[in-house]
Image (tube, rainbow, N blue to C red):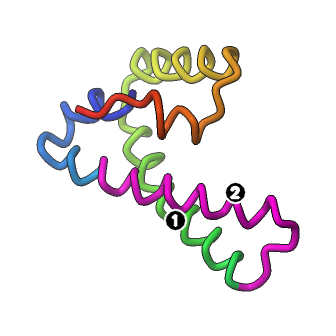
Amino acid sequence: MLYPTLGKFLGEYVDQLLSKHDEAIKSAKKVTELISKGDIGEEGAKITAGSCIQLRWAYNFAERLEKKEINNLWKKFTDLRNEGVPLLEWAEKIRVKP
């Protein structure tokens, strides 16, 4: 949802962002697995911190969007949440890649 919008700012760089996003999704899945087991330990904490850093770049780019674009994205995310679609499920099964 975010990448077509960011394309107007970044052009072909969007493909690299998609790759980074895929890496962040893999990290988020790993963190989810660790947390579901209870105490994540030192290695789990490192993975979690790395995941947060990977996701920070998306926020930085989203700050550059116009209010109308942010509201449109917010509506899409809210609709998914209201439908009960977990974020990682959306990322794996529903997300449309260009």
Which residue position is annotated with label 2? 32
Label placed on residue 67: none
Residue 22 sits inside the magenta stretch: yes
Q: Quadrant of the C terminus?
A: top left
Give me the residue at 50% from left, 52% from top.
25
Measured as percent of width and height from the top left, residue 87 is found at: 60, 36
Picture layout, residue 58 above or below residue 50: above
Measured as percent of width and height from the top left, residue 10 is found at: 19, 42
Question: For the view shown, which residue lies furthest in the right direction?
Answer: 38
Where on the picture, by quarter, is residue 88? Answer: top right
Where on the picture, by quarter, is residue 2? Answer: top left
Per the rendered image, the range of residues in magenta is 18-42
Is residue 80 rendered to the left or right of residue 11?
right
Measured as percent of width and height from the top left, residue 48 is found at: 64, 68
Give me the residue at 79% from left, 74% from top.
40
Q: Secondary structure at mark 2?
A: helix
Give the residue type at disc 1.
Ile
Label placed on residue 53: 1
